[in-house]
C-alpha cells in the first residue's frame, strides 16, 4: 500500500491515517507493506516495480466530501514527461516503474476519499470522519482480495 497526504492539511491527512490503520490491521501479514509519503515521487518507482500488487491511497477534490472511489490504475503514457514535476500520480508511478525497472505490479488500485476541507489543521471534516468506518472496510476488502489474487 502506498499512501500520500499531509496530516497538517485537514482531509488531506486521510491517506496517512488509513496507512496507519492498515499497518495495524495487517501487522501480522508480512506480505503487506505500507509506505506513507506527503507526495508520490519518482523514487517510489522501484518499490512499485517490486510489488506484486499495489493500492494507492489519497484524498480527492473531485469527489464529494467523504465519498469513496476505488478504481484500477491504468498505465499512463509518457511517464518521462511527468518527471519535470516532483509529484506523480498513481498511473505515472506505475508507468515509471515499467520504464525504469521493466516491471510493474500485476494489479494496481487507487482508493480515494473525497475531501471536505484542505485548510490548515490536524482534524478531518465531519463527512470524512463519518466515512472512515466504510473506507476502512473497503480498504480491508481490497487488500484481502489482492492477497487472495495478487494479479
Image (spheres, helix red, strand yellow):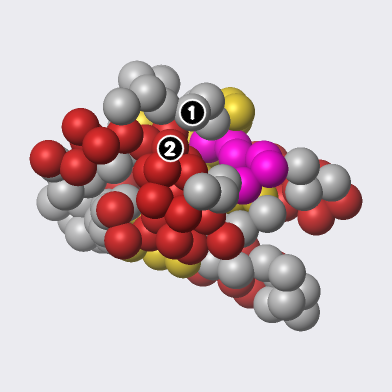
On screen, residue 71 versus residue 79, left or right, reads: right
Determine whether label 1 and label 2 are within 8 Å by CB: yes
Q: Main secondary structure of the magenta part?
A: strand
On screen, residue 39 versus residue 99, left or right, reads: left
- Spatial CA span between label 1 and label 2: 5 Å
Q: Quadrant of residue 71?
A: top right
Q: Nearer the viewer, residue 83 or 133?
A: 83
Picture residue at 20% right of the left edge, 32% below the top: 81
Secondary structure of residue under mark 2: helix
Q: Position of residue 34 (x, y in %)?
A: 54, 66
> Residue under circle 2?
95
Q: Nearer the viewer, residue 134 or 19?
A: 19
Secondary structure of residue under mark 1: loop
Q: Nearer the viewer, residue 66 or 34?
A: 34
Is the residue marked by circle 2 packed among few (<14), some (14-19), or many (20+) residues within 10 Å? many
> Residue under circle 1?
75
Q: Magenta stretch? A: 105-110
Q: Looking at the image, can residue 151 be seen? A: yes
Amino acid at each position: 500500500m502506498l499512501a500520500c497526504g499531509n496530516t497538517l492539511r485537514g482531509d488531506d491527512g486521510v491517506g496517512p491515517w488509513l496507512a496507519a490503520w492498515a499497518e495495524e490491521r495487517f501487522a501480522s501479514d508480512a506480505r503487506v507493506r505500507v509506505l506513507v509519503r506527503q507526495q508520490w515521487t519518482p523514487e517510489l518507482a522501484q518499490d512499485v516495480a517490486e510489488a506484486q500488487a499495489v493500492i494507492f491511497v489519497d484524498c480527492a477534490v473531485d469527489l464529494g466530501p467523504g465519498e469513496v472511489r476505488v478504481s484500477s490504475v491504468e498505465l499512463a503514457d509518457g511517464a518521462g514527461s511527468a518527471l519535470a514535476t516532483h509529484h506523480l500520480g498513481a498511473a505515472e508511478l506505475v508507468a515509471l516503474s515499467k520504464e525504469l525497472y521493466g516491471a510493474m505490479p500485476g494489479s494496481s488500485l487507487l482508493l480515494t476519499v473525497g475531501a471536505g476541507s484542505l485548510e490548515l489543521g490536524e482534524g478531518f471534516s465531519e463527512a470524512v470522519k463519518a466515512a472512515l468506518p466504510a473506507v476502512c472496510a473497503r480498504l480491508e476488502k481490497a487488500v484481502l482480495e489482492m492477497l487472495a489474487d495478487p494479479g
